Amino acid sequence: MTLSRPTRWAYAKTARSIALQAGLADGDVLTGTELEALNDAQLAERLQLVTICARIMPEQKLRIVEALKAAGEIVAMTGDGVNDAPSLKSAHIGIAMGKRGTDVAREAAAIVLLDDDFGSIVKAIALGRRIYGNIRKAMAFIFVVHAPIAGFALIPLLLGMPILFGPIHIALLEMVIDPVCAFVFEAEEAEPDSMQRPPRRPSGCFHGHDRLERVSRRTCLCPADWRLCCIGQALCIDDAVEFRHWQNFSYAPN
């Protein structure tokens, strides 16, 4: 019996089958032989349709990484061998294997998987998105709460009205607001669709224009806060005239 050498199509078919079983999106398959015949411009165009690469040499991996970076993509590269070190170093996020990976690969990588489990990458991404989301929520909370406090402390001085918040009031509020903010948002669970969202651009705004507009609107349109502070101030004012003055001084949005 004569065993024939596997053909290029057999390599591509096997790679596609394994990738689909692993949950990767179906797309074109690029083999090392095909990549060798492409220049950089052709490779960049071809990679727009390719989701699977098969039989790729180490120097070809580096070409793929550089082409994806040139197209504006954020590239993560996994590897464990000495030949993977250039690609690990060139990628935005190099991920090396901690158990079976070589010392060269671990030194070149930005992240080392101690258990050599690719599932840890997914867990790390989920944790990072949860932390990032909680930081955004905490920043919005701090802005929404502290902006009215600053307004209540400064606006009466500018308008010549009785002081609402003295230093002791602000200090007491800060002793409550900051610990509550830390405890609540550190324990906040990730949002259900956090892993279904597309990756954010590093050059994008931290909060986003829509979110900033929404937070600013909620900060400005807060008549309940005004009324609460006016009632609190009225409790500290003995003069009935000043009491009526603050009771009538409330903000109502259009």
Image: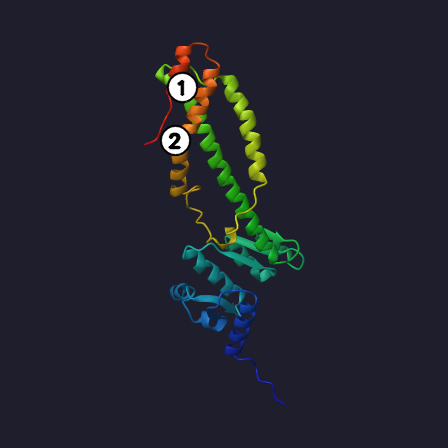
Relative to 253, say whether 28 is above or below.
below
Residue under numbered circle 2: 220
- Residue toward you, 158 or 246: 246
What residue is drawn where x is 52% and y is 41%? 134
What residue is drawn where x is 57% and y is 48%? 127
- Residue toward you, 137 or 51: 137
User: What percent of the width, then of the height, locates residue 156?
Assistant: 39, 18
How dense is the environment of label 1, judged by Cα within 10 Å: few (below 14), some, or many (20 and up)? Answer: some
Q: Residue extending furthest top?
A: 239
Mark 1 in CB contact with mark 2 (< 8 angstroms)? no
Which of the image's four quarters has the N terminus? bottom right
What residue is drawn where x is 52% and y is 71%? 16
Q: Quadrant of residue 116?
A: bottom right
On the question of residue 180 being in view, the answer is yes
Mark number, residue 247: 1
Q: Amino acid at mark 1?
A: Gln
Relative to 90, say whether 227 is above or below.
above
Element on which disc 2 rests:
helix
Which of the image's four quarters has the C terminus? top left
Q: Quadrant of residue 119?
A: bottom right
What residue is drawn where x is 56% and y is 60%? 84
Mark number, residue 156: none
Element on which disc 1 rests:
helix
How dense is the environment of label 2, judged by Cα within 10 Å: few (below 14), some, or many (20 and up)? Answer: some
On the question of residue 150 being in view, the answer is no
- Badge nearest the viewer, 1 or 2: 1
User: What percent of the width, then of the height, locates residue 14?
Assistant: 55, 74
Q: Amino acid at mark 2?
A: Cys
